[in-house]
Amino acid sequence: MTLIGRRRFVTGAAGTALAVTGTTGATVQGAASGTAREAVGAGALPEVRSPARGGPGRRRAEFRGMWLATVANLDWPSKPGLTAEQQRAELLVHLDTAAERRLNVVVLQVRPSADALWPSPYEPWSACLTGTQGRAPGWDPLGTAVAEAHARGLQLHAWFNPYRVASHTDPARLVASHPARLHPEWVLPYGGKLYYNPGLPEVRRFVQDAMLDAVRRYDIDAVHWDDYFYPYPVAGQVFADDEAYARYGGGFPDRASWRRHNTDLLVSEMSARIKETGRDVAFGVSPFGVWRNAGTDPEGSDTDAGVQTYDDLYADTRTWVREGWIDHIVPQLYWHIGLAPADYAKLVPWWDEVVRGTGVGLYIGEALYKAGDPAQPAAWQDPGELSRHLELAKRYPGVGGHCFFSAKAVAKDRIGAMAAVVADHYPTRVRPPG
C-alpha cells in the first residue's frame, strides 16, 4: 500500500487539491471577526506546560496549530484576483477561527513555489494573490498576518517550500525576472513539475537567502518547512542530476548518500544562519511521518509505508533531531489508529523515542481534512477519531502538541471532529509555545 504525505497533492491543479481535502469553496463558518480579538488578550492566556524534555527543568508550552495553505489557493485566498481588502478580510477570518478553536499557532505558507507573499527582493509575488506571478497585490500579506496573529494571541510560523518552482515544466510560463529563468541551469523538470536542483551549492545558498529575508524583516515566530526536499518519486522517471553528481558527488559511496548530504546541509546551514540573525525565531520541519520502515532498518518504525523519507526524499529527519539542527519536528501522522501499513498508535511512540533527551519539540501533524471525507475509510467517518489521537498522545511525554491540516477543515469541521478535539482537550486558551 502506498502512503503519501498530504502536501504531495497540493502541487497539482487547484481542483485536485480541493477534491482531496473535500472542500469546495471559501466559506468559513462560525467565525466572528472582532469577538475573538477581544477575547484573547495575551495577558489573559494561562500557560499549560508539557512534561520536561531535553534536561532537568526544561518545559515547553502546548502547541495547538493549524496550517494555512496558499499553494493552488488551497485555503487562502479563496481564489486569485481578489482585491487587497477581500484578501485581508479572508485572512482575518482564518485567524479569528484559529482563536475561537482555542489554537495558538498558525502556520502560514508564504513561499509556496519559489515566490513570495511579501515584497521579496529575491523572488516574485505569488500568483495565488493576483493570478499573475510578479504582480504586487497592493498590500503586505505576511506583515499583516504577523501583526494580526499576535493581536489575537497567536504565533505566526512562516511556512516555506525550499525547492519547488512550479506545477508545470515550462520555464517560459514564469515571469521574466524569475530566478529560474535567469538561471536555467538551476532547474530540473520531474514528474510534470519544475524544481530547483538541491545538488547545487549556489541553489542551496539562494533559497536560504530568499527565506532569511523574511526572517530579518518580520517578527515571525518560526521558520517552518514541509515534507518536500528531493521530490516524491514518480514511477518510470529519473531526477536528472547527473551533472551535479559528477561535479560534487565524488566523495560519497553512492548517489543516495550524496543527496542526503545535500539535504543535511540545507537544514544545518539554515539552522546556523537563522541563529546568526540574532532574531528569536524557531526552526521546525514537518516531514512525511515515516523515517524508515523496520523492514528496511531495524531502528525504523513498525510500518510498511510506500514512502520512507530517508530513502525516497533523501531526508534523514531523525539525524536532524539528534543533531539539534531543528527546534521542533511536526511529523505528518495522517493515518488512523489501527491502519496496518502505518498505525498512528505505533508511530507516536516511535517519534517520542526519537526526541527523547534531545530538547527538540515534538508536535504531531493531524489529518483533519480526512474527517468526514467519504473517500476515506470508516475510521475517518467517526468524529471522535482525532480526539482519540490526542488522548493516545498524552501517554508519551515527548509529545508537546498537535497541528491540524488545514485551515478550511478547521473552519468547516465537516463532521464535528475539530469540535470534539476542542471540547475534549482544549477547555481554555493557552499561551503559545516558546
Image: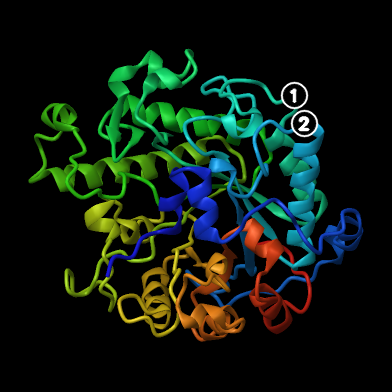
Instruction: Give amino acid for label 2.
Output: Ala
Describe residue 408's horizontal placement relative to residue 355 as left or right: right
Which mark sits nearer the N-terminus, 1 or 2?
2
SS class, disc 1: loop
Instruction: Give amino acid for label 1.
Output: Gly
Please tell me which residue is depicted at 72% across the width and 43% down the height of the picture. Answer: 146
User: Which quarter of the figure is the N terminus placed in?
Assistant: bottom left
Describe residue 74's horizontal placement relative to residue 204 as left or right: right
Label 2 packing within 10 angstroms: few (<14), some (14-19), many (20+):
some
Please tell me which residue is depicted at 31% across the width and 58% down the height of the picture. Answer: 319
Residue 225 visible in image: no
- The answer to the question of whether label 1 and label 2 lie on touching residues, with beta carbons closer than 8 A, is yes
Describe residue 255's horizontal placement relative to residue 367 as left or right: left
Q: Between residue 391 and residue 70, name the one nearer to us.
A: 70
Locate residue 129, reporting x and y percent: 65, 32
SS class, disc 2: helix
Name which quarter of the figure residue 243 lies in: top left
Residue 44 visible in image: yes
Q: Between residue 57 and residue 281, name the one nearer to us.
A: 281
Locate residue 130, reporting x and y percent: 65, 28
Please tell me which residue is depicted at 75% across the width and 69% down the height of the picture. Answer: 430
User: Which quarter of the figure is the C terminus placed in?
Assistant: bottom right
Locate residue 431, reporting x and y percent: 74, 64
Please tell me which residue is depicted at 28% across the width and 79% down the height of the picture. Answer: 302
Label 1 packing within 10 angstroms: few (<14), some (14-19), many (20+):
few
Q: Between residue 220 and residue 175, name the one nearer to us.
A: 175
Locate residue 280, reporting x and y percent: 62, 45
410 in relation to 115, above or below: below
250 in relation to 16, above or below: above
Q: Which residue is mark 2?
A: 84
Q: Which mark is residue 138?
A: 1
